[in-house]
Amino acid sequence: MKEIRIHARAGQGAITTAALLGYAYFKEDKFPYAFPHFGAARMGAPMNAFVRVDDVPVRLRSQIYEPDFVLIVDATLMRGYNCFSGLKEKGVAIINEKEELELPKMKPSQKVFLVPASDIALKTIGRPLGNTTLIGAYAAATGELKLETVLEVIRIRFSGKAMEGNLEAIKQGYDYVKHKLLKG
Amino acid sequence: MKELLEGSRAVAEIVKLCKPGVISAYPITPQTHIVEELATMVNNGELSAQFVNVESEHSAASLVLGGVATGVRSYTATSSQGLLYMGEVIFNIAGMRLPLVLTCANRAVSAPINIWNDQQDSLSLRDAGWVQLYAENLQEVADFHLMAYRIAEDKSIMLPVMVCMDGFILTHGMEPLDVPEQGQVDKFLPAYKALYKLDPAEPVSMGLLADPDYYLETRFALQETLKDVLKLLPKVSAEFKSVFNRDYKDCLIEEYMVKDAEKVIVAMGSVCGTVKEVVDELRKKGKKVGLLKVISYRPFPYQRIYDSLKDVAKVGILDKAVSLGAYPPLAAEIKGAFCGKKKSPKVISSFVAGLGGRDITPETVKEVFLKLNQKEVNNEFIDLKPELLKESYGE
């Protein structure tokens, strides 16, 4: 079983991110359970979305406290919260990069990827919604999902300009991390 | 076909396959996506139904009451304050013997305001004369809706059914489920033919005054019919299995590792999945633990539960609701099942957890199992924050 925790603000597409990750895992014949946890019911309020995935149907219904993977859509959330809380020993965090980002001390076995997702999204989608870029980065950073599966999900879920933009965002997010990994 | 759907979407898909002719909704909080999806389907022409937006839940319930009364299969969904506001009509629908199916997205009730999950809303309406089924996962949610219409519209029953699914955890959760074909559904659920209906050609009256000479018998009849539901549910479940190849046994309870268990948790709804995970974990360590999941809370399967738990040493009931000033709603029934009986667990403790969306984690469940080592406790709240319990008043 693998567990993903997404940190965002309401309105930043965390649920869509969880849903797209869920779809991609589903396409790869896994059993996902993707679910949100809302804070205050208003735009901009900090909220989480989660994906729990396994080779058998997921029964566990609690929130995720010890994630394998953390996606941080809005780095300003790191000011008030420990977004890395409970991250597993070999956990991977993918962060929508923000200038002057101060990272907490991570364990040597944990990996952090800073991805300029908002910038990439602005260029590809035309709006600073970094979610899909982060999903591309997630596929590259974790090896959990094939790039082609993620792209297929985007082709099913989006159409027209939004599809084109998001496909490009995912590819760029993926390539950004792959490039970083190659450089070491 | 296996699909990955959000819970609310899954309900809309399954309701569409049931072909209701009338759907009503008060479309703002605490409503769910269920009726949004159905409205889209009606608008697209995927579903031929009258979809009526009304000005309150009281009207939403009244409208579908009218729909079923004219002999048309009807549907609505609500939760929390919305269900409570329907309350008066909810009693009427059962009293008038109208086979409505309603989805309750289980959520906490005010005050204080809380939009999150527990099961206080539907359990507060337990005495209304409705059948209440509680689902653990999205497959059950979908399948119970199909069985709900079958039970409700059975000529020997003619009672409304509430399918209860945990708010957010299931309504907003996405997971794979098998969505049946229309042909399968048609085979299992034939078109509704009312025994009696409002029809200008053959006028009848419904829900009239029953004075002291008549009222008592109407309530007795409801009580007797709900006993019949206990017998019908297993039959409908068997037929369901023959069409859809999914087995809910008697569809009254589910026993998970109960047979040789020394400690059993009794619960309802999605938390049962979490309990099963903990049961598996503790079993691996050699602990003899199990889960009894109650599916049908109304009618309550006392005999079935007695047979299942009579030789278990310790039982812990995990309620996601309270009956303030008394035992919690599920605990009261479980204790009642052993009252005056020959055999009984030595300990029947009752616990309250998860109110207002407080997360029920595997640790919560383990604590319940652990507390079964102690002497019997009642209304023990789990995961309380002591720092929030200090009283302070302004000067």
Image (cartoon, coloured by chain):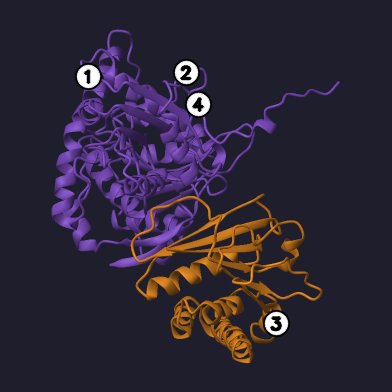
Chain colours: A orange, B purple
Q: Residues within 10 Å of mark 1 (few under 14, many from 20)?
A: some
Give the residue number, with chain letter if any, for mark 4. Answer: B380
Q: Amino acid at mark 1?
A: Lys
Image coordinates for residue A129, horizontal then vertical, percent: 66, 74
Q: Residues within 10 Å of mark 3 (few under 14, many from 20)?
A: some
CA distance separating discs 3 and 2: 58 Å
Q: Amino acid at mark 3?
A: Leu
Give the residue number, with chain letter if any, for mark 2. Answer: B326
* Residue B207 in view (yes/no): no
Give the residue number, with chain letter if any, for mark 3. Answer: A122
Q: Which mark is residue B343?
A: 1
Asked whether the residues under the numbered discs 2 and 1 touch, taking CB atoms below 8 Å apart as contact, a structural biologist would say no
CA distance separating discs 2 and 1: 24 Å
Q: Could you tell me which secondary element the residue under label 3 belongs to?
A: helix
Nearer the viewer's eye, disc 3 or disc 1?
1
Image quarter of residue A57: bottom left
- Tell which circle, 2 or 4, labels the residue nearer the N-terminal end: 2
Q: Are marks 3 and 1 on the same chain?
A: no
Q: Which residue occupies the extreme right position in the image? A: B395
Say which chain tag 4 marks.
Answer: B
Question: As rendered, which of B130 and A14 lies closer to the eye?
Answer: A14
Image coordinates for residue B308, horizontal then vertical, percent: 22, 31
Q: Amino acid at mark 2?
A: Ala
Task: Tell me if residue B185 comes above or below residue B228 in the rendering.
Answer: below
